[in-house]
Amino acid sequence: MIATQATSDDILIARIAQGDRLAMQVLYGRHHVRIFRFGLRLVRNEQIAEDLISEVFLDVWRQAGKFEGRSSVSTWLLAITRFKALSALRKRKDAELDDETANAIEDTSDDPEVVVQKKDTSVALRKCLTALSPDHREIVDLVYYHEKSVEEVAEIVGIPENTVKTRLFYARKKLADLLKAAGVERGWP
Amino acid sequence: MMATSKQVQTETAPGEIEALLPWHAAGTLNARDTRRVDEALARDPDLARQYVAIQEEYAETILLNESLGAPSSRAMQKLFAAIDAEPARDSYASFNISARVAGFFARLSPRTLATAAAVGALALLVQAGVIGAVLTKQQGATFQTASAPKTDRQPIDARPYALVRFAPDAKVSDITAFLDSYQASIVDGARGGMFRLQFGDKAMSKDEVAALMGRLQNEKIISLAVAAQ
């Protein structure tokens, strides 16, 4: 995120703390899509992900006065989203969905004789990214899509910085295993 | 010199640098670590091969997330309905003060209260005063929630409004064409870079306004558009 937007986000939060509804609309407009996508990747249900957005931003409305600016607003939003997504997941058994996804991955390797084209590799890679465990999915998304630093991911997930690095490393190894099972060799590991 | 070489070798140990590769691909490393990774990539073909795989993962993760689309307007409607239902901030503050006073007195033991009857009586008086002040303030309050009827501030012209931020590279001719095509006019701005625009020649339903906001967001010259009043 560019520095000017981060500063502007801080100003919006200060205005929201004063009850400024317009500032809330602007902050929502700026962040709701990414928050939705992060939540959706965790809970895998659009309806629940949409409910999460409302809950996350309602928390922002209520807690804006307590925001101290130690982290960026986007990091704060992602941390709230993660907390709410995990709470939603605890209410819902997700095991069935994981099984379905794992089966779907195996379907892609139905013909080992077929030469894997670049496009197929891309499709397989995306399917395998979907098949990662929730812990691995969130760290991959936070680093690659939300472009969070080691320190920011540590804050959002609530783990030490070294664990952030090793968790992403093992997530990538798992991804490579899934790709191998789908018939895609990338020369690593 | 020998010690320095050893130090460099330790600092650029494959495990440590390898762990930083994803952040290097995402461009979120600090300058020092970026330089260390660059140097390691230049001299280690295995690491460079792994970095290519990471760049693929990086690109596909972005494509995957972008393919997830965006939430419906229902989420925003639900949020602002909930915000409208929230108590006004002033009333929160008053409640907290009275709650703190009440909590303080609640923590005192009966013995303390019995042995300090005069203090207790005074406390009751103070508490009664606080409650009275709260009630008086609430009765006299002039705030109004956004969901409450607002006939006194409802604009006579019910055409929809939006707050719009134009893209930095938008030309005046683009903006003029945009205003023409949407039958829109700028009625206020630019506060914080946002312009208040009014659209069309008639009132719109909530769904029509939501659809309009969706179309606006897809305009190249618009970087942000939110419905406004």
Image (tube, rainbow, N blue to C red):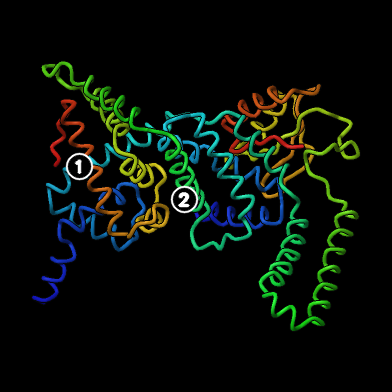
Instruction: Say which of A74 and A59 sits in front.
Output: A59
Side of A160 where B169 appears, left or right: right
Residue at point 76% right, 51% down? Answer: B88
Mark 1 residue element: helix
Q: Quadrant of the C terminus of chain A?
A: top left
User: Which amino acid, by three-letter code, is at mark 2?
Assistant: Ala
Q: Chain of mark 2?
A: A
Side of B143 where A25 appears, left or right: left
The answer to which of marks 1 and 2 sits earlier in the sequence is 2
Side of A126 where A158 appears, left or right: right
Cβ atoms at labels 1 and 2 below 8 Å apart: no
Residue at point 62% right, 55% down? Answer: A64
Q: How many marks?
A: 2
Residue matched to label 2: A79
Residue matched to label 1: A173
Instruction: Tell me where residue A92 appears, x and y as whole percent.
Output: 43, 34
Residue at point 42% right, 40% down? Answer: A90
Say if B66 sits above or below B207 in the image: below
Residue at point 57% right, 59% down? Answer: A67
Instruction: Say which of B220 and A93 sits in front.
Output: A93
Instruction: Tell me where residue B57 appears, x and y as whole percent.
Output: 28, 38
Mark 2 residue element: helix
Instruction: Tell me where residue A158 appears, x and y as whole percent.
Output: 39, 56
User: Which amino acid, by three-letter code, is at mark 1?
Assistant: Lys
Residue reaching furthest to the left: B2
